Amino acid sequence: MHVRDFAAEFEQFWAVWPRRVAKADARKAWRQVQHLLPPVERVVAAVEAQRRSDQWMRNEGRYIPYPATWLRGERWEDEMEVQVLSQQQAVPWHQTAAGIVERGGQLGLREADFGSFPAFKAAVFAAHRRAVSGDAGNVVTLAARRVA
C-alpha cells in the first residue's frame, strides 16, 4: 500500500495555485480535507482547468477563491463549462473570407462597395488596425473613397 505524503502533495497544489494568499489557512484546509482528496494529479488538473475559466481570469484574477475556501468547498469536483466552437469560430477571422466579410460588417464596410474582394479585404484590414489602435477614423468615408 502506497502511503501519501500530504505535505509534498500540498506543495504541488500550492505551486499551481494562481493567487497565493493565506498559505497557512490553505495548509490547514488541506489537512482537513485530506480524507476526501483524490490523487494530487487530479487536484492539480482541476486547478489548471479552472485557472483558465472566465470567472478566474476576469478583472485580473479578482474572483479567484482563496485556496482554503476552494479546498473546503471540494471545488476540484466542479464541472467546468465547455464552449464548443464551430470550425469557423475556431479559425481567426482574418483567415477566412466569411470572417473578413463579418469583420468588415462590424466596421461598417460592405464588400459590395468595393470593386474586388482584395480591395475590400485591404480596407477591412486597415480599418481593423485603426479600430484596435483606437484611431477608428471615419470608415464610411474610407468606403466611399474606394467606390469612387
Image (tube, helix red, strand yellow):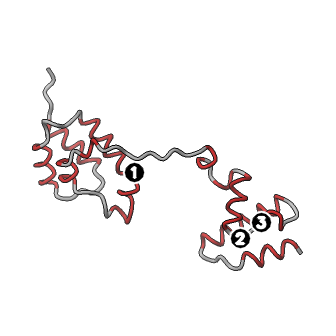
Residue 52 appears at what percent x and percent y?
40, 51
Question: Which residue position holds label 3?
Answer: 110
Q: On the image, which quarter does residue 117 sit in? A: bottom right
Q: Secondary structure at mark 1?
A: loop
Q: Quadrant of the N terminus?
A: top left
Q: Quadrant of the C terminus?
A: bottom right
Q: CA distance from mark 2 to mark 3?
A: 7 Å
In the rendered structure, are the residues bearing label 2 and label 1 in contact, judged by CB atoms less than 8 Å apart?
A: no
Q: On the image, which quarter does residue 43 sit in? A: top left
Q: Residue at x 23, y 48 (%)?
A: 14
Residue 102 appears at what percent x and percent y?
69, 59
Figure check: 2 above or below 28 = above
Residue 108 shown left or right of residue 63 in the figure: right
Q: Earlier in the sequence, mark 2 or mark 1?
A: 1
Figure check: 103 above or below 139 = above
Question: Which residue position holds label 2?
Answer: 108
Residue 148 shown left or right of residue 100 in the figure: right
Question: Which residue position holds label 1?
Answer: 52
Q: Secondary structure at mark 2?
A: loop
Q: CA distance from mark 2 to mark 1?
A: 33 Å
Q: Residue at x 21, y 44 (%)?
A: 74
In the rendered structure, are the residues bearing label 2 and label 3 in contact, judged by CB atoms less than 8 Å apart?
A: no
Name the one closer to the observer, 21 or 46. Answer: 46
- Kind of residue at disc 3: Arg
- Kind of residue at disc 1: Arg
Name the one closer to the observer, 129 or 76. Answer: 76
Q: Residue at x 27, y 43 (%)?
A: 76
Q: Disc 1 or disc 3, which is closer to the eye?
A: 3
- Kind of residue at disc 2: Gly
Residue 93 shown left or right of residue 113 in the figure: left
